[in-house]
Image (cartoon, grey):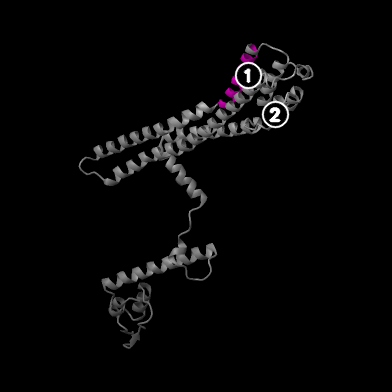
Amino acid sequence: MNSSTNSSIENHDISPNGGAVEIPATEVVDASVHSEIVQSAGGKVPSLDASATEVLKEDAANADSLLDIAEDASTLGLPGSEVSATNTLLPDTGLDQLDSLIQMLDVGGPVVWILIILSIVSVTITLLKLWQFAVLRPEKTDLVNKGLEHWKAGNAAFAISALEGARPVPSIVRSAMCGLSEGKDPHMLKEELTRRAQGYVNQLTALLRPLELIANLSPLLGLMGTVLGMIVAFQQMEAAGSQVDPAVLSGGIWQALLTTAAGLAVAIPVAAIHSWLERKAERSAWLLDDAVTQVFTFYFNPLVAVPSDTRADAGCVAE
């Protein structure tokens, strides 16, 4: 009990028989207890002053708060009857985080939704390209190197048989060996091999242009969202007139910058993935061109020419 309350309530009141009713100073006296004392004393107990009444109300409110905290503690299964203030603050659940994310998306407006769609498209393209490179394995040159070793040694049949398979690079190199072994026109053979090689490289570079476009457009879309957000913020300031609230401007600025951050978050990884995939496609094209060039170079080199008696046993089939 507060000292003001103890000073406002007399420790000895008058009983109906004229005796004194002792009120212990150590006990908390609220308004209901005082009313009962007044009734028992026949209305002869002095009334509480205003300060004492306020203190009693405040103590009653605090007691109710403690009861509520205790009930919450029992509901949550917390040990002990006393619950600290820090225990009443529960961590955010996943549902709350999802609500915060949805709120941020609503604040960002249509620009953020467009960026989300672009990010989904970029992830889909990336997964498709990774699957394609895993299946084709364009940079795996073990079979090609083995075939070229036999070809340079003058063993056309072993070289061609070593390149049997369904992968594009060994297939194109094998076609070059078979064409030269069968005596086809080198110029026409090069044209045909160039056509097939270009088709293969186009498969590797397919869908890379959309990734490049997303990487270039995402920062611009974020910047456009920032400009639109700043326009809205300044319009709100103009509508407020002379009573401008700084919170309006700061809120509009962070909402506008949210779109820029979203645009950069989409553009940076997409640009990195595009550069990596493009490099893999370029390397694959270079390896293919290098292998075919070696086939022609060593075939027409008189010092290492393939013997004519081995060409008939090459076992080439029509491609």
Q: Residue at x 31, y 44 (%)?
A: 250
Left or right for 210, reference 259? right
Q: Residue furthest left?
A: 242
Q: Secondary structure at mark 2?
A: helix
- In-front residue for pair 83/264: 264
Query: Identity of the amino acid at label 2?
Result: Glu
Q: Is residue 248 above or below residue 285?
A: below
Query: Identity of the amino acid at label 1?
Result: Arg
Q: Position of residue 7 (x, y in %)?
A: 28, 79
Q: Residue at x 67, y 18 (%)?
A: 302
Q: Is residue 73 visible?
A: yes
Task: Indicate the quadrant where residue 54 lies.
Answer: bottom left
Q: Are marks 2 and 1 in contact (CB under 8 Å)?
A: no
Query: Magenta span: helix, strand or loop, mainly?
Result: helix
Label annotation for residue 149: 2
- In-front residue for pair 38/213: 213
Q: Position of residue 172 (x, y in %)?
A: 66, 22
Q: Position of residue 160 (x, y in %)?
A: 73, 23
Label annotation for residue 282: none
Q: Position of residue 58 (x, y in %)?
A: 34, 68
Q: Is residue 319 visible?
A: no
Q: Secondary structure at mark 1?
A: helix
Distance of label 2 from label 1 (alpha carbons):
23 Å
- In-front residue for pair 190/137: 190
Q: Which residues are magenta?
A: 188-206
Left or right for 245, reference 286? left
Quadrant including the N terminus: bottom left
Can you identify the residue that label 1 sits on?
196
Q: Residue at x 48, y 49 (%)?
A: 96
Residue 193 inside the magenta-drawn segment:
yes
Crowd band around label 2 with a 10 angstrom C-alpha radius: few (<14), some (14–19), many (20+): some
